[in-house]
Image (cartoon, grey):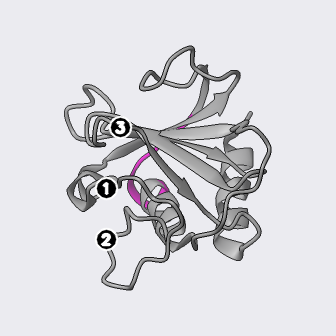
Amino acid sequence: MLHWSISPAPIRRAECAHAVPAEAVAATVLIEVVRISALPTERGVPYPGRVVAHWTGSEAAEARTLIEMLPGSEQHRCGFSPGWSIRAYEESLDLALFEAAFCFRCHEVRMHGTAVPPVPATQFFDADTPPAQALLALFRAATP
């Protein structure tokens, strides 16, 4: 599972540098879904791309649940070419609590944001599992 899981189950992770605090995940009221168009020019800045959806309520809860269910994995080499990111916001809708960019080829997710420690977090997930495929299906369905 990714380390931002708020469940008490043991967390299996590979090379997890840091984690999104559970409080930030719990405080999330809005998730922006971004179709990434390029890599950012520097670490810690938002991934460029078009916002294709805004999820609140049950949609946001479903995405959080799927992400929490993602099992850990080893890194696969592709050079990190993420197609999707999510930006999570709390009620003020000010700065993003965190952004998580997902690469379904190398099984890597990179996170940054106000709720993430200063060093960018990198985790690996098994992109071939049912929760990962369901998350990818949600991302694809969000694209007009």
Quadrant of the rendering where the C terminus is positioned: top right
Rounded to the nearest angstrom, the CA distance separating label 2 from label 1 is 8 Å
Task: Pinpoint residue 71: horizontal percent, then vertical percent.
Answer: 58, 74
What amino acid type should be assigned to the residue bearing mark 1?
Answer: Val
Task: Pinpoint residue 38: horizontal percent, then vertical percent.
Answer: 69, 21
Q: Residue at x 63, y 51 (%)?
A: 108
Q: What residue does disc 2 label?
A: 6
Horizontal side of residue 82 vs 111, given as left or right: right
Q: What residue does disc 3 label?
A: 119
Task: Pinpoint residue 24: horizontal percent, then vertical percent.
Answer: 25, 51
Q: Nearer the viewer, residue 85 or 103?
A: 103
Q: Residue at x 27, y 30 (%)?
A: 93
Rounded to the nearest angstrom, the CA distance separating label 2 from label 3 is 21 Å
Q: Is residue 56 magenta?
A: yes
Horizontal side of residue 34 vs 32, given as left or right: right
The span picked out in magenta is: 53-59
Horizontal side of residue 8 vs 109, given as left or right: left
Figure label count: 3
What amino acid type should be assigned to the residue bearing mark 2?
Answer: Ile
Task: Pinpoint residue 97: horizontal percent, then vertical percent.
Answer: 30, 38
Q: What residue does disc 1 label?
A: 25
Q: Residue at x 68, y 58 (%)?
A: 75
| Tag 2–tag 3 contact (CB < 8 Å) | no
